[in-house]
Image: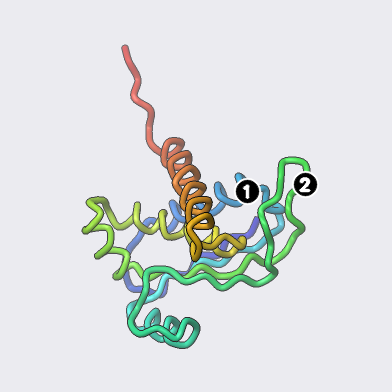
């Protein structure tokens, strides 16, 4: 599985954690081991330009997804074919403001946005209420499971 992360934002983030999450997501959604994913972190100006160019909406946003081979989640017996998932573009500065409002740190917000972006690459959407329920439910489950695996377990003596 190839996950390329480029941090062009100028903001220090937990890049290794984002890559670990990417691997976790692709494994748990049964994406072919030879699939490729690109994650790019950009500054506000770059994100604003992308948001205007691709979404025709003003101002920067937190995450954009650019699917390539239109891969969809597989199953344990049938992973997706090999291919290029696409690009998830994150803006740490926008994410930082959201993290502060939500009461958690930037790294946690970037993990949430990475999960959201990857699900968009795999065809999930939230335009309709039933789609939103499915996508956000899966997003919460995947992220909670990942964070549960990442955090050290308390030991009792």
Secondary structure at badge 2 equals: loop
| Residue appearing at x 42%, y 60% in the figure | 113
> From the viewer's perspective, is residue 54 above or below residue 74?
below
Residue depicted at 33% across the width and 73% down the height? 10
Q: Could you tell whether 124 is left or right of 55 in the image?
A: right
Say if 63 sits above or below 18 in the image: below
Relative horizontal placement of residue 46, taking residue 27 as reference (left or right): left
Q: Quadrant of the C terminus?
A: top left
Residue for point 49% across, 66% down: 127
Give the left or right position of residue 129, taking residue 58 as reference: right
Q: Which mark is residue 80?
A: none
Give the residue pinned by disc 2. Answer: 78
Could you tell me residue 23's position as x and y percent? 57, 51
How far is the residue under mark 2 from the one under mark 1?
11 Å
x and y percentages locating residue 44 in the rendered image: 33, 78
How packed is label 1: few (under 14 Cα within 10 Å), some, or many (20 or more)? some
Residue at the (56%, 67%) spot, across then down: 38
**Lower position in the chain sequence, tag 2 or tag 1:** 1
**Percent x, y of residue 116:** 47, 59
Q: Quadrant of the N terminus?
A: bottom right
Do labels 2 and 1 touch, CB within 8 Å? no
Q: Is residue 18 above or below residue 157?
A: below
Residue 119 picture location, percent across and down: 55, 58
Binning the other alpha carbons within 10 Å of mark 2 as few (below 14), some (14 to 19) or many (20 upward) gives few
Q: Which residue is mark 1?
A: 29
Looking at the image, what colour scheme do you see? rainbow
Q: Between residues 157 and 106, which one lies in front from this camera angle?
A: 106
**What secondary structure is marked by label 1?**
loop
**Residue sitting nearer the eye, 75 or 21:** 75
Q: How many marks?
A: 2
């Amino acid at each position: 599985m190839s996950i390329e992360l480029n941090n062009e934002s100028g903001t220090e983030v937990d890049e290794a954690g984002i890559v670990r999450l990417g691997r976790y997501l692709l494994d748990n959604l049964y994406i072919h081991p030879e699939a490729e994913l690109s994650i790019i972190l950009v500054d506000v100006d770059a994100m604003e330009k992308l948001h205007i160019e691709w979404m025709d909406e003003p101002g920067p946003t937190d995450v954009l997804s650019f699917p390539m081979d239109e891969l969809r989640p597989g199953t344990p017996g049938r992973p997706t074919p090999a291919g290029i998932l696409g690009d998830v573009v994150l803006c740490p500065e926008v994410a930082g403001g959201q993290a502060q409002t939500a009461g958690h740190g930037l790294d946690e917000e970037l993990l949430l946005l990475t999960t959201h972006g990857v699900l968009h690459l795999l065809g999930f959407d939230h335009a309709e209420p039933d789609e939103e329920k499915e996508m956000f439910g899966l997003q919460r489950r995947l992220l909670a499971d990942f964070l549960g695996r990442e955090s050290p377990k308390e030991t009792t003596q």
